[in-house]
Amino acid sequence: MNSVRNGLRKGKVKKDTYGRLSCSECGISLKTQNDPNEVFSVRSCPECGTRWKVL
């Protein structure tokens, strides 16, 4: 699982003018999943299932 910052640099994640993140392959907005046992939250694409860490 890569970080969102790394995905933005590689062009796999896009950020619009309002700061919303979306998958560049599918064009769908990323959903947030919070796990209380982890320090980070996870953003995932509902279409392709790609997951990104938000530190």
Image (cartoon, rainbow, N blue to C red):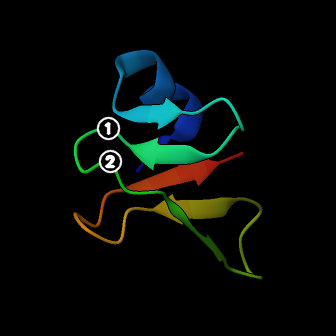
**Position of 27 relative to 30 (above/below):** above
Q: Residue at x 63, y 45 (%)?
A: 20
Q: Which residue is mark 2?
A: 27
In the image, residue 2 lies at what x, y percent? 44, 42
Query: Can you say which quadrant of the picture contains the C terminus?
Result: top right
Quadrant of res 12: top left
* Left or right placement of residue 13 versus residue 27 in this view: right
Q: Residue furthest bottom?
A: 36
* Left or right placement of residue 53 versus residue 13 in this view: right
Q: Residue furthest top?
A: 9
Q: Residue at x 28, y 67 (%)?
A: 49
* Left or right placement of residue 24 versus residue 36 in this view: left
Q: Nearer the viewer, residue 3 or 12?
A: 12
Q: Secondary structure at mark 1?
A: loop
Q: Secondary structure at mark 2?
A: loop
Quadrant of res 18: top right
Q: Which residue is mark 1?
A: 24
Which numbered circle lies on residue 1?
none
Q: Residues within 10 Å of mark 2 (few under 14, many from 20)?
A: few
Label 1, label 2: how far apart the Cα atoms are: 5 Å
Q: Residue at x 71, y 59 (%)?
A: 40
In the image, residue 45 lies at what x, y percent? 38, 62
> Would you say the residues marked 1 and 2 are in contact, meaning their CB atoms lie under 8 Å apart?
yes
* Left or right placement of residue 39 versus residue 24 in this view: right
Specify the amino acid type for callout 2. Gly
Specify the amino acid type for callout 1. Ser
Q: Nearer the viewer, residue 36 or 18?
A: 18
Q: Residue at x 56, y 33 (%)?
A: 15
Quadrant of res 16: top right
Q: Residues within 10 Å of mark 1 (few under 14, many from 20)?
A: some
**Position of 53 relative to 24 (above/below):** below
